[in-house]
Image (cartoon, rainbow, N blue to C red):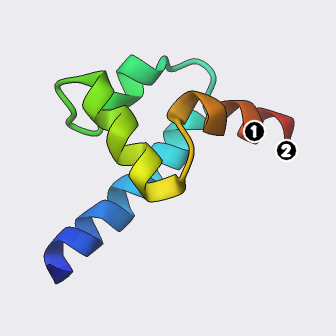
Amino acid sequence: THYQALTDEFLRARAQELLANDELTIKQVAAALGFDNPANFGKAFKRWCGVSPGRYRSGAASA
């Protein structure tokens, strides 16, 4: 649905912002976005961005 697409876009953008901050663990990022289970966050992030949160963070750190 349109609402779900907007929600996913917001969460994707916020996740990318939070992952750019090395002070937060991936578990903390997941919790900040409302995910009870970090594995579910990892699956959602991979669906949104095509890579895992850890891989994204590694790439963002080198950019």
What residue is rendered at 19% in x and 82% in y? 2
Residue 31 appears in the figure: no
Q: Residues within 10 Å of mark 1 (few under 14, many from 20)?
A: few
Numbered tag placed on residue 59 in the rendering: 1
- Tag 2 and tag 1, C-beta contact below 8 Å: yes
Name the residue at 27% across, 73% down.
6
SS type, badge 1: helix
- Residue at the (24%, 64%) spot, across then down: 7
Q: Could you say where residue 39 lies in the image, as x and y percent from the top left? A: 31, 25
In the rendered structure, the answer to whether residue 3 lies left or right of residue 56 reads left
Task: Name the residue that disc number 2 marks.
Answer: 63
Quick one: 22 or 27, which is closer to the camera?
27
Task: Inspect the image, locate mark 1, and give the three-letter code of the amino acid beneath it.
Answer: Gly
Query: In the figure, residue 54 lies in which quadrant?
Result: top right
In screen coordinates, is 62 left or right of 16? right
The amino acid sitting under disc 2 is Ala
User: Where is residue 33 drawn, in percent x and y?
Assistant: 29, 39
Which image quadrant: the N terminus? Answer: bottom left
